[in-house]
Image (cartoon, grey):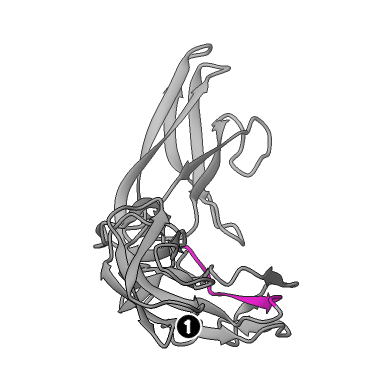
Amino acid sequence: MALVPATFEVEFTSQYTGNHRICWRLSTDPPGVYDCSTVIFCTSGNTCNHIFNVQVDNETCDTVAYEGYVQPTCFDEVSMDGRVAFSSDFIPDPACKKWTITCNDGPVEAVNVQNGGSGYTASFPVTINGAGTGATATANVAGGVVVSITLDTPGSGYISATADLSAGDGVDATALVLIEGCSVNIEGCTGDPESIVMPIGNTLATCKDSLPLIPATASVIQDGHCLCQTCTSYLITNSDVTNPYDALYVDCNTLQVVIQSIPASAVSVLLGGPGCTVISGSVSLSDTSLTAIIDPCA
């Protein structure tokens, strides 16, 4: 709890000349007792006001609300007659900020042979085509087939890329270009750093008082706070019939970042740990290039 000074102002137009009591209390469930010790004199038809000085918790997850009423003192304090209700809200600003990190692009990580083809007699350059620049590679040949591809320079700025093996003198060789993700350190609810590699195009949230350190291939925005969240579990179904799915989440019990592989065509898998609120239904995830970010700090 971090108590900070705050004020709220009650302003009203008096309907008669005389004393008015201002009764107020913190809005709670169940409601508390009104403080009616404030009495001010107002002239009929004029605007009157009073400023209350209070202490509020700036790290609560809920809006701090005050409620009350103004009533001429010619009515008895327990009477409902002459009451004019008011309310005032204080919006807390927790210190722990939520940062959303996005992995925008990266260098080429590797070029893997998919089909070695046939009829090749010598090594040859492989052209990397994509939105980035600077990546170069060389196809290695043995026994007439492409056996491996050496990444000579990784380049930068790639979101996706393809390999062109047409410079060789054989046929049918194909290769898959892998783009390196963004290596970042995130903080779970305990504040402990976890080093992970984000796939291109993915986002994740982390709790940190100051701007987190990220690579040049990623971007970050501050879009909320982390203290007001509850731990939530999700039911996730991997609907891909052939590929497993890696889900990244924060365990509700240990508050540590966990990566769990969900098998292909799996029945729903509960992520987050027992003792948490489970969202009914499931989320079908068929794109294995994505990583689920399930973070109670998000």
Say if residue 103 shows up in the picture.
no
Task: Give the percent coordinates (x, y) of residue 129.
Answer: 41, 55
Q: Residue at x 50, y 73 (%)?
A: 173
Q: Which residues are magenta?
A: 227-240
Q: Where in the figure is residue 224, as x and y percent of width and height? A: 42, 53
Q: Image quarter for residue 279?
A: bottom right
Q: Quadrant of residue 153?
A: bottom left
Query: At 51% across and 16% down in the image, what residue appears?
Result: 17
- Residue 4, compared with residue 136, is above or below; it is above
Q: Is residue 133 above or below residue 186?
A: above
> Is the N terminus in the top left, top right, bottom left or bottom right quadrant?
bottom left
Q: Write the residue at 64% across / 83% down.
A: 270
Q: In terms of depth relative to the viewer, which is nearer, 115 or 92? A: 115
Question: Residue 32: x, y in percent?
Answer: 55, 57
Residue that mark 1 sits on:
259
Asked whether 12 or 210 is in front, the reply is 210
